[in-house]
Image (spheres, coloured by chain):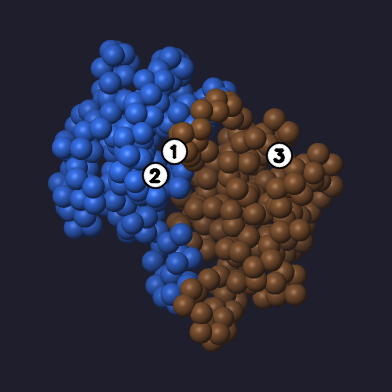
Chain colours: A blue, B brown
Amino acid sequence: MGRILDIESGDEDETVLVPPSNFSMVEEAIFRSSFPHPSNFPFLQTLNLRSIIYLCPEPYPHENLEFLQSHNIRLFQFGIEGKKENSSPVRNNSIMEALKVLIDVRNHPVLIHCKQGKHRTGCLVGCLRKLQNWCLSSVFEEYQRFAGAKSRIMDLTFIETFDILILRQCLYSIIYQYQGYGSKKRRLLYKDESLQKPGLTSF
Amino acid sequence: MGRILDIESGDEDETVLVPPSNFSMVEEAIFRSSFPHPSNFPFLQTLNLRSIIYLCPEPYPHENLEFLQSHNIRLFQFGIEGKKENSSPVRNNSIMEALKVLIDVRNHPVLIHCKQGKHRTGCLVGCLRKLQNWCLSSVFEEYQRFAGAKSRIMDLTFIETFDILILRQCLYSIIYQYQGYGSKKRRLLYKDESLQKPGLTSF
């Protein structure tokens, strides 16, 4: 809570904060929004992000990259096409890989965004909700709250048919291995350890 | 994260969770929703609530009270009329008192709800966002995301004219006093200590 933290520390800074449109907290340390512009950077700072999951194929703008570098935020990009012609297997694979990054607590706090924070972001959050065992009508209600009049049947079908069992099985086996290390704190991990060593989460 | 926590503990329980409609996380340990029905109770359990802020004048249903008692959840009721004829000073006073409860971390995790989770809940969350220094257009965007077609100009005006300076000043003086106790953990407190002793937050 950016502002309230300021109050706690007695800081009298009255900077008005501008969250990106369609901003919301999804879960503890997981946020979603539309594409952040420089006017949103002071707000993003209050989130103390460790990473960003970006769901578009277009390269990240220079000034956004600079913001990430100066705040030690790691960028995970999954280039999902925004058009409806997108083939399902490709999207399926990208969302699965994005989910693995999303639920890895070493990447938290994390912000998910695409362009409008409606369709691609809505699909990823919808799949996370399925993993959390939310009933499908609640998953759809949440999707529609952000997509509004631009809600797409194709996205709802994608979420409905997305198979989380594979990911869940994968998680069980990883957790089983991880617990073998005797750590008291059991955390979610994903398999590709070569990408990222534990504790090393920024550039 | 209810479901993911289950995964962490290796619990294979496949119960489908049904969040109340208009459910969302507002901030860490602050949630909002429409009126929770018994079908939502298993989901609410995953939030480990310490309190509920209920913004309607109607008495809380017996089965909801039972759920609260069996899970040691404290109920804070602020009876705000749902109709548009509601006088502004009365609503103003109720929202101010509700805000004091809301930002007191001893009451967290806390769920805010009214009937639909649109108007009264939207006003309280809107005032919290002002306290957090969000720009007004972002506050309104969030209000509208939950109110949808039922968005009310009267609510937007209420949020815009709500004076958070009084509360902020009040917080500064309380925090100043609290820091006088020499505690290393500076937390937000409100004044009416007779209502609730520190550490005693349930029935």
- Give the farthest residue toward the bottom: B180
Q: Residues within 10 Å of mark 1 (few under 14, many from 20)?
A: some
On the image, the x and y values in percent for residue B69 come to 77, 49
Q: Which residue is mark 1?
A: B8
User: Which amino acid, mark 2?
Assistant: Arg
Q: Is residue B86 visible?
A: no
Is A108 rendered above or below residue B195? above
Give the image quarter of residue A162.
Answer: top left
Question: What label sits on residue A186 in the rendered view?
Answer: 2
Q: Residue at x 67, y 75 (%)?
A: B191
Question: What label sits on residue B35 in the rendered view?
Answer: 3
Q: Is residue A51 visible?
A: yes
Q: Chain of mark 2?
A: A
User: Which amino acid, mark 1?
Assistant: Glu
Give the image quarter of residue A118.
Answer: top left
On the image, the x and y values in percent for residue A164 come to 41, 22
